[in-house]
Amino acid sequence: MIQQTPEAERFKKQMRDSLRHETLKSRAVTIPRHANVYTCGDQDGMVYFIEAGQIKLLLLSPQGKECLLAIHSAGDIFGELSLAGLGARHETAVAMKETTVKQIPCAQFFARLSRDSLLEAFVRYLAVRIAGQQQVIANLVTVDSEQRLGKTLLQLARTLGKKDQQSTRIELKLSHDELSEMVGTTRPRISLFMQRFRNLGLIETNLDRFLVINEQKLTDYLARAIAAGHHRGSRDDSFQTRPVIRQMLFPKLAERHIESIRR
């Protein structure tokens, strides 16, 4: 699990303060729940700053299967791939609840970071996010679905959670379908693992229907599961058995595989 460094956390706070100042006179855009901020293929050249709400980023396979890439909340930015000048969007951004965002043109975004001496910190921040995405890919290849779910819940707790004395509350109502998109497995398996986690006291649902994670217990459980898995030397759902995820990550590899079958 990639931990947020103190430097990255400090930059996020500095960036939020800087962008709030930059967008004071900008028009806020309210996105209804389940509506798209932008869609794969769009070309808008904007970076988005979230004032309130949550946004999820989705990648679609050629067959229409969804892979949930990330969830962002108030104070976060998204859509920063436009800074690379890649042209059309490669992902779709969807509001998970009514969300207020402000648009920042790429040139204006760079100018603000430069004025506030945040360019170097922004590079470090992006490096941490890249490391996190690499960890997600590594988990898809090497870790079974129950452990991936556990790691995903821990990551959500650390990025979106509010801590109590012994647990962390995620004030975001995630469906099992959305968790299955993040983990890369089926909804029934997510339901099975979530019930197991509840029975073991690793998670619970409070009166507000928010998920509560016991981070220490879940971390210890995953450590034992990983050790047991290494001892067995097997996994329940290897990367090779997940063609949709494989095709999303390595489309050329998938094409060659299909062609070999045809031959």
Image (cartoon, rainbow, N blue to C red):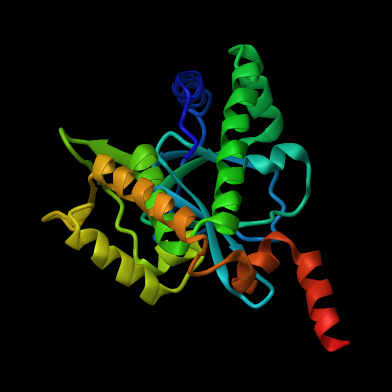
Name above or below for residue 3 compared with residue 56.
above
Query: In the shown orientation, is residue 154 left or right of residue 108?
Result: left
Res 244 quadrant in image? bottom right
Question: Which residue appears at 61% of the width and 44% of the height?
Answer: 134
Query: Is residue 53 visible in this depiction of the protein?
Result: no
Question: Which residue appears at 66% of the width and 66% of the height?
Answer: 246
Q: Position of residue 133 (x, y in %)?
A: 59, 45
Furthest residue toward front: 231
Furthest residue toward right: 263
Furthest residue toward bottom: 262
Res 197 quadrant in image? bottom left
Quadrant of the image containing the C terminus? bottom right
Query: Is residue 45 visible in this depiction of the protein?
Result: yes
Question: 232 or 173, which is in the foreground?
Answer: 232
Question: Which residue appears at 54% of the width and 52% of the height?
Answer: 139
Q: Position of residue 198 (x, y in %)?
A: 20, 60
Question: 57 or 219, which is in the foreground?
Answer: 219
Query: In the shown orientation, is residue 249 left or right of residue 52?
Result: right
Query: In the shown orientation, is residue 43 left or right of residue 216?
Result: right
Name above or below for residue 163 compared with residue 59.
above
Q: How many numbered markers are drawn?
A: 0
Question: 62 or 223, which is in the foreground?
Answer: 223
Q: Position of residue 87 (x, y in %)?
A: 78, 49
Question: Which residue appears at 68% of the width and 25% of the height?
Answer: 110
